[in-house]
Amino acid sequence: MVGVLNVPKPPLFSPFSLRKQSRTMVSIKASSESSNSQANSVSTSTKEEQKPDFASSSSAATTFASPPNFKPPEPKPFTVRPDKTWDIVGAALALFFRLGTGVFVSGYSASFVSENEIPPGQYCLQLGGSKVKETSKIGPRPEKPIEIYEFEGCPFCRKVREIIAVLDLDVLFYPCPKNGPNFRPKVAQMGGKQQFPYMVDPNTGVAMYESDEIIKYLVGKYGDGTVPLMLSLGLLTTLTAGFAMIGRMGRGSSYTPSKLPPKPLEIWSYEGSPFCKIVREVLVELELPHIQHSCARGSPKRQIFYEQVGHFQVPYLEDPNTGVKMFESAEIVEYLKATYA
């Protein structure tokens, strides 16, 4: 049985402030996605929860700046840096095992159109001399980003990240790598145990464990109520989500000591991209909270991004702590390690 927690609506970056508030823990039943062997039921209780104040911590007191002589690289579409070839190949294996789930937004369709059908300033996919018009059907949009506590090397978490891409939702991710000191303990405080993924919807006050129930909740609230086929096959879904991680050999699972920034980073990416995958792995390992602007094929946010930047390519990182904005997955990985590790 899966429990649902009705919690007060927190501000967008609630873990980044310090205050005490009463929370009522209600009884939860959960099953096999736990990262440890804690009991699966939580007794009803009321306790004082003190949220960590990163603004006053030693890490947040550090002044963050881009590495010396840093210059954001020029975007190079569909180019793999030679030393990252096998990383990209390994990350791309997931597309085979998951049959492309997380590459396309719900209701995706594409059609070839003449060049004059695409007005100047509008994003479109160009194949040779032809242009492709892409459309999708998205549901209601949440006012605030969904908050998800998870980590890369977890098949249950991958399932939730795939539905995020399909529904084209923006998400505030709190990475929970093994031995991570910040957000794993917070999940235990909020829900009673360290089990992942854990979702909090600040728009409704709903919080829950269990990947399948999170998926059902999200498609019911922000989609058309239909769970995509590759996310509705029970054990087969979980097995193929596990196989999808074979090429990365556990990357994005274990904590690397890091300095926690006062503000979440922002990344434009989507689950089906192998280039985005290797950046996400490092964000998780360094336990860096980040807002993901999901932009799978068919996403209306591709047009928003195109208008802001002038062309479309992901991943694209925006770091409000240093002012850095940059393309290129390999260089983003190096930047994150140099700045926060």
Image: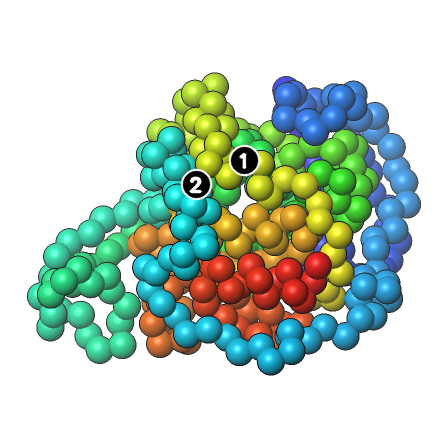
Could you classify mark 1 by the number of other residues whose Cα lies within 10 Å: few (under 14), some (14-19), or many (20 or more)? few
Judged left or right of residue 102, residue 211 is right
Q: Do the numbered discs 1 and 2 sit on residues whose CB atoms are within 8 Å?
A: yes
Residue linked to disc 2: 90
Q: In the figure, residue 314 lies in which quadrant? A: bottom left
Give the residue at the far left of this rendering. Answer: 114
Judged left or right of residue 144, residue 327 is left
Image quarter of the C terminus:
bottom right
Q: Which mark is residue 18?
A: none
Picture coordinates of residue 244, whole percent (x, y): 45, 33
Is 182 placed above or below 62 here?
above
Q: How is the image coloured?
A: rainbow
Instruction: Please indicate, yes or no, whether residue 138 appears anywhere in the rendered image.
Output: no
Picture coordinates of residue 259, whole percent (x, y): 75, 60
Is 243 placed above or below 83 here?
above
Is 206 placed above or below 124 here?
above
At label 1, the amino acid type is Met
Q: In the figure, residue 16 lies in which quadrant? A: bottom right
At label 2, the amino acid type is Gly
Instruction: Looking at the image, tell me whether mark 1 or mark 2 is earlier in sequence order.
Output: 2
Image quarter of the N terminus:
top right
Picture coordinates of residue 302, whole percent (x, y): 36, 63
- Dot 1 lies on which element? loop
Q: Which residue is painted at 60% across and 69% down in the image?
A: 319
Q: Which residue is painted at 49% across and 34% down in the image?
A: 245
Residue linked to disc 1: 249
Could you classify mark 2 by the number of other residues whose Cα lies within 10 Å: few (under 14), some (14-19), or many (20 or more)? some
